[in-house]
Image (cartoon, grey):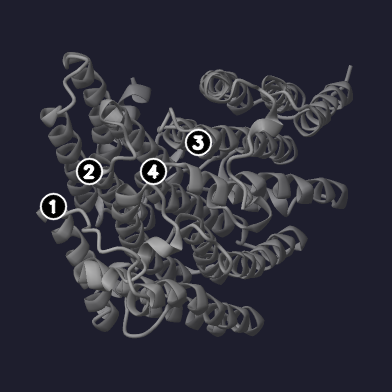
Amino acid sequence: MELSLNYLYSITFYIPECIAVLVMAGILFLEIAYKKHDSKRILLKVFTIVGLIVTFGALVFNLDLPSKNIFYDAIVIDRFSVLVKIIAVIAALISYWYGLSSRDIYDSLKSEFGILIVGGLIGTMLLASANNMLTLYLGIEMLSILSYPLAAMKRLDEKSVEAGLKYALYGGLSAGIMLFGMSLIFGILGTIQFGEIAGRITTLDVTQKAILVPAFLFFFVGLGYKISCVPFHMWTPDVYEGSPIPVTAFFSVVPKIGGIAALVRVTSAFFVNENLIQYSWVAVLTLVAALTMTVGNVSALGQRSVKRMLAYSSIAQIGNILLGVLVLDSIGQQAIIFYFFGYMIMTLLAFGITAVLSDQYGNDYFDRFNGLIYRNPFMAICLIIAMLSLAGMPPLIGFVAKFNIIAAIVKKGLFGLAIIAVLNSVISLYYYMRLARLVVFKMPDSTEKLFRLSIGRQALFVSMALFILIVGIFWEDLYKFSDVTNQIKLAH
Amino acid sequence: MGIIPYIVVSSILFICGIIVMIARKNIIAILLGIELVLNAAALNFVAFTKFNNMNIDGHVFALFIILVAAAEAAVGLAIVIRFFQVRESIHIDSATQLQS
């Protein structure tokens, strides 16, 4: 009796996820109802978009609830996780919108695209509020398993299928290693709850701690693969280049913010008291953050394909966000959430414009952007705003986001990392400006007209560019909104 | 019989899985290697539950691993079939379209 009551009570806090699951199931049923050759499927598209908007509404409604552990401490709902989910829903909505008009996604597969996007979103939501190793693993797998077919979505294209294959193989490998690490942690500590781990570490002897260090490293492999930080980033450029662009836009935002959210929660669970294991985890994170920024930025320099360049740039941006994880308190989390907002909008804007050009020419090499400003000034200006913001130029949102993170780690006393971050910002300026230079100063190769953009897409691009500009100047309100007032609490 | 034999077997499974993934060039064999690693982890969970701590978490975890491994293998094999139809090979070295 008490058991069922507890579950019913828990579900009242879990309404957004339930809505998302119903949307996913609804798309499946609607898809069956259509005839095979009916490629318009208006109702299905409207249903997906409305469903995602309703999920968004339910999340906003959940925003000010006090933090709460539900389902016997398996899931935690707090302001941090709800903010992460809100960002994920917006990103999923925008990438679905791109997918509807993109030629990269075949017309007959648009409904599957919706199902997989919503499923990936559910995985991210699970990951963002995971409070034990089982829910974390399920979140990662939900996200990964639905991402493999997404990457292989363009199924007649060799590149896309190969991207899906590489994603699946790397994903399986890292998930296996992570699980092995988890099993060792479980064996030594006897618990899968994050909240109990910190307390039990203090009771161990030296041998057990010595086994625990590699176990945590194994555990980090899975998370590191999801957020594509440096030793595990090899799949990122390949998968991003091969996947259809709307899928790439989805990959570059939704799984990564889920992974970072899980990493923040894991890190804040282990850092209650200081000892050897905590120090080694911080050392690993520091090293990984520095390497991620540097390798991402340096590799982005010589790329020919804009998608590949954006992939490396997203690796570098994740390096910046990892600095926020190292701050280890609510200010760091606030900076991370703010960075997520900026990162999502900037990246999606850049991918959206790349998608338009790639639809036109069939590829996304840099020379396709030559003289874009003479052919379509509207798109060119949006692109330049996105590039300047990604490079971190004031007065755009990218600058404020980077500033907040670097201010937080300077306050923490990690000056070395702050210097590396600023130097990397200078390197990144080169390749972002290279694209902006092509857009403005190169003459176009042909006078061929570009597609006319639909009103909806124009409005989307303009609102994203205005968001970057306006929030860059009046950033206090969004920064206050990102505040994680009820700090991440863990059940003990 | 204590816990040591279980850990030895699971470690051997894990190492075999990693070696298979690195050494074999056949994609199906690589997927099998992934399964070996997952099973090593599942065995660990069950063994630790039996000998160290009596809570049910480990058993539940092992069940979920079996379930997710099946889902992952299904999706992985589907992609391999797609790859075979496009490239007419299941050799990992024929995945050469995406290189910088």
Camera-side residue of B41 and A341: A341
What amino acid is at disc 1? Answer: Ser
Which percent across, then down, holds residue A120?
Answer: 39, 38
Seen in the picture, residue A144 relative to A255 is either above or below; the reply is above
Q: Residue A247 got which mark?
A: 4
The residue that appears at 71% across and 35% down in the rendered structure is A180
Which percent across, then down, holds residue A449?
Answer: 21, 58
> What secondary structure is marked by label 2?
helix
What amino acid is at disc 3? Answer: Ser
Which percent across, then down, holds residue A139?
Answer: 47, 37
Q: CA distance from mark 4 to mark 1?
A: 20 Å
Q: Nearer the viewer, mark 4 or mark 2?
A: 2
What amino acid is at disc 2? Answer: Ser
What amino acid is at disc 4? Answer: Val
Within 10 angstroms of label 1, few (less than 14), some, or many (20 or more) residues?
Answer: few
Q: Can marks 1 and 2 be said to lie on one chain?
A: yes
The residue that appears at 56% across and 38% down in the rendered structure is A167
Within 10 angstroms of label 2, few (less than 14), some, or many (20 or more) residues?
Answer: some
The residue that appears at 51% across and 32% down in the rendered structure is A161
Q: CA distance from mark 3 to mark 1?
A: 33 Å
Within 10 angstroms of label 4, few (less than 14), some, or many (20 or more) residues?
Answer: many
Query: Is A355 left or right of A240, judged from the image as shown?
Result: left
User: Residue tagged by mark 3?
Assistant: A144
Tags 1 and 2 touching, CB below 8 Å: yes
> What secondary structure is marked by label 1?
loop
Camera-side residue of B68 and B60: B68
User: Residue tagged by mark 2?
Assistant: A101
The residue that appears at 52% across and 40% down in the rendered structure is A136
Query: Is A37 left or right of A389, judged from the image as shown?
Result: left
Which percent across, then down, holds residue A211?
Answer: 82, 45
User: Residue tagged by mark 1?
Assistant: A454
